[in-house]
Image (cartoon, helix red, strand yellow):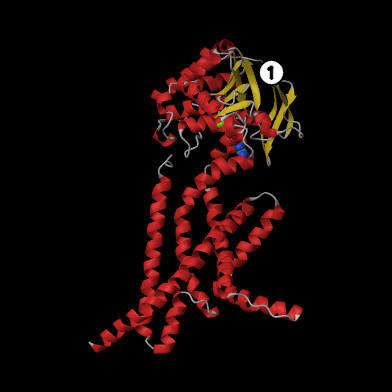
Amino acid sequence: MSLLSTYIEHIINVLPDLVTGSMITIEITSFALFFGMILGTISGLGKLSRTRIFRYPCIVYIDFIRGTPLLVQILLFYYGIPGLYSNATGNSLNIDPILAGIIVCSINSGAYIAEIVRAGIQSIDRGQMEAARSLGMTEKMAMREIILPQAFRRIIPPLGNEFIALLKDSSLLAVIGVHELLKTGQLYISRTFAAFPVYIAVAIMYLILTILISRLVAYSERRLGVSDRS
Amino acid sequence: MIEVKDLYKRFEDLEVLKGISVDIKEKEVVCVIGPSGSGKSTFLRCINLLEIPSSGEIFIDGERITDKKININKMREEAGMVFQHFNLFPHKTTLENVALAPIKVRKISKAEAEKRAHDLLEKVGLLDKANVYPSSLSGGQKQRVAIARALAMRPKVMLFDEPTSALDPEMVGDVLGVMKDLAKAGMTMIVVTHEMGFAREVADRVLFMDDGIIVEQGTPEDIFSNARNERTKSFLSKVL
Ligand SMILES: Nc1ncnc2c1ncn2[C@@H]1O[C@H](COP(=O)(O)OP(=O)(O)OP(=O)(O)O)[C@@H](O)[C@H]1O
Ligand SMILES: [Mg+2]
């Protein structure tokens, strides 16, 4: 009984830290998803482009990011690039860990979102583009007015999955000292050695966040999906 | 008004059109019939450049649309196309489907485009469906909206690619009715169709295509009652 009450006490004590950490996690994930969507839309379209100078860089970017672990990307960006900079210039370069986290996660999710965007666009019936073109719309106009709005509705569910995956993967940023959810828990453990209750609490916090996101996704799906049943 | 000269179209090693030449006058209604795979759709799609001809020339109103320097989008504005599978925009209401291209392409005001769409929907008998999404329309209604959508661009010629083939039999009449009205109003039309009754009644001229060429052409009477070519006869004996 006293073990349980000790655990509960630890959880109550760590909770404010975990809430603060969650805020950082949400902040990083949201920014990364936002920039990832921009990057992903551009490179997803780029991968579909007929022009090689657009297509090839996009393919290299997407394949490189998807083919290497996020942890390696984080370390490469946070330690590797400043290392290269100081070797090359003799000066040192310090990157803010949170900023580094946002940048790496944006680049990472951009590659996954690119594939989501590409698949979404390709899932739209060819007849839609043909109808738009037959009405005299340019390819760009048809993309903007006809294809992308329809593709966007279809990519909301996979985008939601990407959001959840990104939120969980952002815990890797603990290794470069970002005070996100996992790291705040670990810092508490290093002071108190209360590994079990704190990791349980951390896990439950992630669970709450991911459940909230899937609710949000389901809601926006319902809001946007109404008119698109052909 | 539409002049096609020695049109060839190849997809990789498959030659689909093998020298098509035809002149179509203003207000003429031309029906194109022929077996599956004979190149009817490809021919139609070449006329509004959804397919780029491999060789040959096409003129619309004296303008050579096969000219490499010509603005393809500009040319497509002049030829309205109606597809077998309607291809309405599912994320736009019926009215928006019709008004979109005039606003975005012709750059007319939203109010004017909606007025135009309103009138066209009335003409095809679907004014009461102006604010619904295509998903709630029947096939015949969808196709009539698609016709209104193409007409909203005020094209010089309307191209129909089997507009009734995907419809339940009881819907076919409504769509053909709209097309008949259009023909009566003096629209230049090229219609690929399996509706021989429609061709017989409405067409000024019938083209029979087989294997990438126009095998025989003439008035509906010439083709349906007095076909001379064996291939035409054998095709008609199967469909009539
Ligand atoms: N984009 C394409 N790429 C390759 N082959 C094609 C393409 N479009 C059409 N074809 C081929 O060209 C031939 C003629 O096709 P087309 O659609 O013009 O025939 P059709 O007369 O309209 O037939 P149907 O009555 O079945 O519609 C067919 O063998 C078809 O497979
Ligand atoms: Mg066809």
Observer able to see residue B181: yes
Of residues B19 and B137, the one nearer the viewer is B137
The quarter of the image holding the N terminus of chain A is bottom left
Q: Where is residue A174 drawn, in percent x and y?
A: 50, 78
SS class, disc 1: loop
- Which residue is pictured at 54% across the width and 38% down the height? A127
Residue A57 picture location, percent across and down:
68, 59
Q: Residue at x 66, y 15 (%)?
A: B25
What amino acid is at disc 1? Met
Q: How far from the left and from the top, in percent, is residue B22?
A: 69, 20
Residue A162, above or below A187: above
- Which residue is found at the position 53% from the left and 59% from the top? A34
Residue B17 seen by the camera: no
Q: Residue at x 55, y 21 (%)?
A: B234
Q: Position of residue B118 (x, y in %)?
A: 48, 24
**Number of marks in the rendered image:** 1
Determine whether B3 is above or below A207 in the image. above
- The quadrant in which residue A59 appears is bottom right
Quadrant housing the C terminus of chain A? top left
Q: Quadrant of ligand 2?
A: top right
**Which residue is labeled 1 in the image?**
B1
